[in-house]
Amino acid sequence: MTLAINIFLWLAVSVLAFIAAMRGRSLFNEATRAGVMEFILLLPRIGVGVVGSGFVAEALPNEWIAPWIGPQSGFVGVVIATLGGALTPGGPVVGFSIGAAALKSGAGAPQVIAYSTAWALYAIHRLMIWEVPMMPARVVWLRAAVSLPLPFLAAILAMLAGRP
Amino acid sequence: MKLPARPCTVNGATADNSTSVNYVRDAVTDSTPARRRRRAFDWSTAVIAFLAFAAAATVYVRDGREHFLLILLGDVTLFGEMLPKVLAGCLIGAFVTLLLPREMVARWVGHESGFTGLLIAAFFGFLLPGGPITIYPVAGAFLVMGADAGAVVAFIVSWTLIGYTRALVWELPFFGSDFVIWRIVEALPLPIVAGLLARLVVRAGFEYRETSK
């Protein structure tokens, strides 16, 4: 599985790199430099996120997680998880690593889905850093507002569908 | 349409005299990606690092050295497995940011309306790789090209929830394929729901284009 994904991703990189190289050497160089810089900047975050989530999952006692957002916590758990997601700051690693840690230490799958959906859609600091500078502000607020029910919908669908 | 607070962040060049339309058009045509000042370590990473350290210490003291090393080994293996994917993801994002024919994509969405427009917007959100630097200027371009708020919302929500590069690079290593596929299948209707909701809100009188400015 992981090999297939690697092959797929690197095929995509090769195709894009080829197109860029056809368009011009400087375009190719600029894109490569930007991509590698992004990677280097992300490295410490990924390291901390991945290694951290393993230890956090191990250290958290199940009896803390389960009553709040465990499989039996139902809709209240979904609400708590959604709030947690909205308030979690940080880049791509943070929300997923916290979600994974919670799942390993006894959180329910619909609750984790609500958490990561809320974090992806309307983590407050991300709206401020990315969306507001790049988009008309009223469209950003409209998008955030209509996204409010989505983590609940995702969790409800997850509950209906049952675990994989 | 309202002028965003800090327009210069989209394309590095300052957009001094421009109206918002000019600014978004710059975002459409200018191929220079954003140059945001970024550091390798910020305060949210510091908080996570602190938590990780505290958790690691707890495990070491409570469960002993052997258990600690076992977990560390597992985590480091996961980290090593992620690296090539993340590098590929970063490169894909950088190349797409520079190569993407934004006007062409925007025209597709802009000229459609109705339910089909939402479907096309959601499909592009799924299809387009890259990070926020790629996505938000494209979404801004949709607006300039005449797409309605519903299509723009469907596009952004779709990219956020079912975009495949995001899932492959970031989510999969943490959660495993079963969980991620399950989550994405359940997220499939959500971009359309969000787009329809946005249209309802606009129909109810919410003004998102400011024509006078």
Image (spheres, helix red, strand yellow):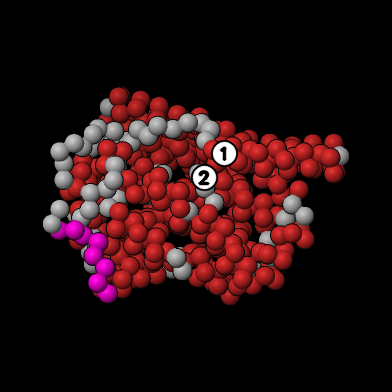
| In magenta stretch: residue B210 | yes
Numbered circle sitting on residue A90: 2
Find residue B142 and report its horizontal and vertical position in percent: 25, 54
Q: Quadrant of residue B79?
A: top right
Q: Main secondary structure of the magenta part?
A: loop
For the residue pair A107 and B111, the one nearer the viewer reads as: A107
Which chain's residue wears label 2?
A: A
Q: Position of residue B187 (x, y in %)?
A: 48, 64
**Mark 2–mark 1 contact, CB under 8 Å?**
yes
> Would you say residue B5 sits in the magenta stretch?
no
- Residue B162 located left or right of residue A107: left
Q: Is residue A24 above or below residue B205?
A: above
Task: Name the residue at 66% across, 64% down.
Answer: A69
Looking at the image, which residue sits at the far left? B212
Quarter of the rendering containing residue A129: top left
**Helix or strand or loop: what does disc 1 sit on?**
helix
Tell me where the magenta segment starts and ends, as one range.
B204-211
Q: Residue at x 41, y 54 (%)?
A: B159
**Quadrant where the N terminus of chain B is found in the figure:** bottom left
Q: Is residue B190 left or right of residue A100?
A: left
The residue shown at (79%, 43%) is B59
Labels 2 and 1 positioned on one and the same chain: no
